[in-house]
Amino acid sequence: MQTTVYPFPSAACTVYHDAPLSALKATLPGRAIVVTDQHLMDAHGDQLSDWPCIIIPPGEQYKTQATVDDIIEQLIAKGADRQTTLIGVGGGVVTDITGYVASIYMRGIRFGFVPTSILAMVDAAIGGKNGVDVGLYKNMVGTFRQPGFLWYDMALLQTLPDAEWINGFAEVIKHACIKDADLFAWLEQHHWADCKADAALCAELVRRNSDIKAAVVVNDEREQGERKLLNFGHTIGHAVENLYQLPHGHAISIGMVAACKLSEEISGFASVEKERMVQLLQRYGLPTHLAFDKAQVMDILLKDKKKVNQTIHFILLQAIGQSQVVPIGTAQLADLLEQVL
Ligand SMILES: NC(=O)c1ccc[n+]([C@@H]2O[C@H](COP(=O)([O-])OP(=O)(O)OC[C@H]3O[C@@H](n4cnc5c(N)ncnc54)[C@H](O)[C@@H]3O)[C@@H](O)[C@H]2O)c1
């Protein structure tokens, strides 16, 4: 086991690499309660048998205030106090909701994550954004608060369904697009199944990606500038995700292609690069087109957190590995949605 530290401005986060879940308890200062979902319990319940556990139903549809209330009631019933550490063991739904509960329960208790999906390992567990959805609006309510630790046990990925490997690689491709042209080229030569088959290769890829995300957050924890780049593909992606109940990675993939088309129009992104992007997404089993209802999507975009006055901050590419934040007026965006997408 090896440790590193992500020095986020509000609080440092200790990262445990190559860390078997069985060794976690010995590193904790006192009482801990695990929040996990039923799939993780079915797959790895034997490893959680000596922890008090709160089990939530799996799926984005349970990333809601109702689930938060339910967890809080169980925390009270279990006598959780300010010395208790809350541990989210699961994918991004579990980590988002655990971080949120831990930041509001008794005005904030310690928490950490054991991310178990590729998406949570490379993205959701890192950076201190916690929260829940409200109706169609993704992550509408939440907090910024850093987990005290991230615990990477790659063996947990053995039970991750193939569809979730594909979902997670959408965020890996996102990191390559916005920050790392070499990673993009690496992905063109590989496949998610290579990582599934080779834990060492997977650990290296996960670490490269978690480091990309953490470096962005270290520079801009509260999303005033650079962190916005991580929203590449997410503005339209989030809108279609909830509207059509799409898997997160599929929605982001569609959103990234849409953002590439806007980039061609606005920021000089070459059409040949857009084609590379489409081919890479297809290579990883991700969809690249959806005939969505533009008026409904526009309606959701108008309520997006990234809307400032009458503009929406879009992340556009100048080249693969180079991204920028571009404010687009809502009237212009409505036209672009009709004409370009
Ligand atoms: N906070 C952030 O910065 C941030 C960033 C990106 C995404 N997110 C959020 O993350 C969520 C998506 O995360 P996700 O894709 O991990 O979804 P998820 O948590 O729903 O997990 C996907 C599915 O895989 C199952 N699963 C997870 N790990 C498993 C394992 N090892 N073995 C067997 N089954 C396993 C889960 O039970 C679930 O059914 C979204 O809610 C998104 O908004 C948050």
Image: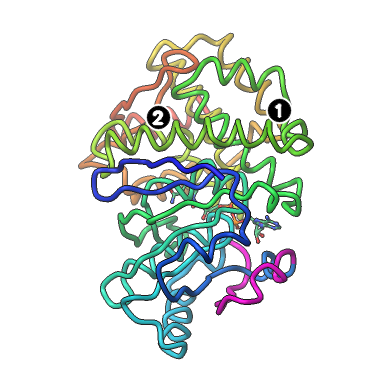
49 or 187: nearer the eye?
A: 49
What residue sits 53% from the left and 66% below the top? 25
Disc 2 designates what residue?
Answer: 335
Q: Number of labelled discs?
A: 2
* Magenta stretch in the rendered image: 43-59
Amino acid on which disc 2 is placed = Asp
Q: Is residue 333 above or below residue 188?
A: below
Taking the view exactly as shown, the residue that stands out farthest to the bottom is 77
Q: Position of residue 286 (x, y in %)?
A: 68, 35
N-term mark: 2 or 1: 1
Q: Helix or strand or loop: what does disc 1 sit on?
A: helix
3 or 44: nearer the eye?
A: 3
10 or 28: nearer the eye?
A: 28
Question: Is residue 75 in the magenta section?
Answer: no
Q: Quadrant of ligand 1?
A: bottom right
Amino acid on which disc 1 is placed = Gln
For label 1, count other residues whose C-alpha is less than 10 Å away and answer few (under 14), some (14-19) or many (20+).
few
**Spatial separation of the CA atoms under disc 2 and disc 1:** 28 Å
Q: Is residue 82 above or below residue 44?
A: below
Left or right of 260 on screen, residue 83: left
Q: Is residue 203 above or below residue 158?
A: above
What residue sits 55% from the left and 39% below the top? 252
Disc 1 designates what residue?
Answer: 282
